[in-house]
Image (spheres, rainbow, N blue to C red):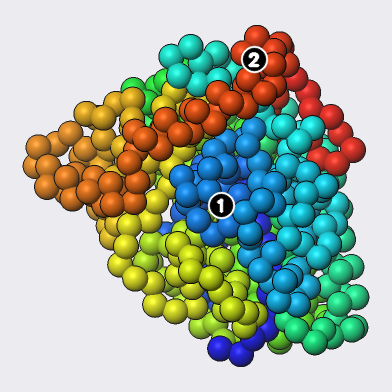
Amino acid sequence: MTPGNLVIIMSDEHDPRWMGCSGNQLVQTPNLDRLAARGTRFTDAYTTCPICVPARAAFAIGKYIHQIGFWDNADPYDGSVPSWHHRLRDQGHRVVSVGKLHFRSTDDDNGFSEEIVPMNVFEGKGDLYGLLRGDDMPPRADGSKLAALAGPGESEYTWYDREIAARAQIWLREQAAKPAAQPWVLFVSFVAPHFPLTAPPHWYYRYPFERIPMPKLYREKNVHPYVRDQGENTGYDKHFADEAAVKRARAGYFGLISSLDENVGNLLNAMRDTGLEKTTRVLYTSDHGDNMGARGLWGKQVLYEEAAKVPMILAGPGVPAGAVRREPVSHVDVYPTVMECVGAAAPEAAGASLFGAIPARGVLSEYHASSSRAGEYMIRYGKWKYVYFVRYPDQPQLFDLEKDPEELKDLGTDKAFTHEVSFLHQKLLSLLDPVEVDRRAKRRQAELVAANGGREAVLRRGSFAYSPPPGFKAEFNN
């Protein structure tokens, strides 16, 4: 492959089923669709963790959560473990970020040549409240804002995303006028469609309520005890009084996806107009998905497809156009992909380059953070998806995603599938010891609680629904 430039575009909480190129006929994403049409779309891509901060740390380092030890939204990446940004910069490539990083601080050496309007965790500490896990885990009080802020309008996030898009376009146009000696990488990270679900009016009203379906299994709600625990702790759903409130939130989410798509289109147009499109590849993904009311759940934090699956589109010179690949892939595959794209030497990594053949393997996602009493692990292998819960070891989940892509029939305790459960559990054990990893995560979280004044101090600080962008402060729920 001829080395070339790379633009990585990351969104936040984008469930890939909500794109036209995925077959969705409701949500309007013409720019992501045209990117997929001139590139390759990976239908079964997964995050390493369905919550922002650890997912982004793993994306940078190219390893799974249990391998890197950044567990939750109060344990942000601090530059101490080398990332693909460090590796490229040290080999003489220019590596620039624009927008949300969700790392610890700009004072850390995060590996970028330049960070433009970066957003990191609040006060360098993040969500300390989410460190309080286990049997005495306190309930969160963030859900009222999720419901109350849903609707048409502008928020600090929509303003911030427009700033990100503007800065990225400026950078691309200026870079096109002064070609570099070595390929460069531009990492553009938007916040949409992360809540607050406040969407610009011209997008929100594209989605009238009569066209919006209710979420699947909404009335059944939380059928697995782990999921019930998580739903009760977040308390999101109790703030949605009726179907109109649910559809208002979903209209906000869909409007934010279309707003994101508009910003992506502006970047793609800048590349086309400057000729960069001929020498520059594009990778689009999201840090994780969003439940958006399915099973009565909102946000992420579980390993159902809505939250664990991510969009993955790769386009540009040398990439097959209009192709669809169905092998399970992961964010850990991005590190070797980036290195191959720019022609840089790559270290041994957990993943495989998306440019080549993907080996048959189990793809892992795991969760050790806010609103979970104990660890949760997912293995995707072929058509099978296996989910193991440390707190409920006798109640694993198993789904045949070929026959049941919506995960409506859980086979985990069906005796007819004992062999598949045993086989996939061994796949999990070949990667990690789930109980020991759970202990490691909780030890680290206890250390962070102690370092921040103890449990009572963390409770007094309270929780907040979302991280503020530059220039804003977090709004705490005490």
- Residue at the (86%, 77%) spot, across then down: 175
203 over 28 or under it: above or below: above
The residue identified by callout 1 is 58
Q: Of label 2 and label 1, which has the lower sequence position? A: 1
Q: Tell me if 301 is positioned left or right of 151 in this view.
A: left
* Callout 1 secondary element: helix
Q: Tell me where residue 86 sits by quadrant.
A: bottom right
Looking at the image, which residue is at 58% across and 26% down?
A: 447
Q: From where the camera sits, is residue 234 visible?
A: no
**Residue displayed at 54% across by 82% down:** 319
Vertical relation: 250 (above or below) 392: below
Q: Position of residue 294 (x, y in %)?
A: 45, 34
Residue found at x 56% / y 52%: 58
Tell which residue pokes out farthest to the left in this image. Answer: 416
Give the left or right position of residue 241, taking residue 265 as reference.
left
**How many badges with numbers are in the image?**
2
Foreground: 125 or 43?
Answer: 125
Q: Position of residue 296 (x, y in %)?
A: 46, 27
What type is the residue that disc 2 sits on? Answer: Gly
Residue 238: name its quadrant: top right
Q: Which residue is mark 2?
A: 454
In this rendering, which labeled residue sits more in front, label 2 or label 1? 2
Q: Amino acid at mark 1?
A: Ala
In the rendered image, which quarter is residue 84 located in?
Answer: bottom right
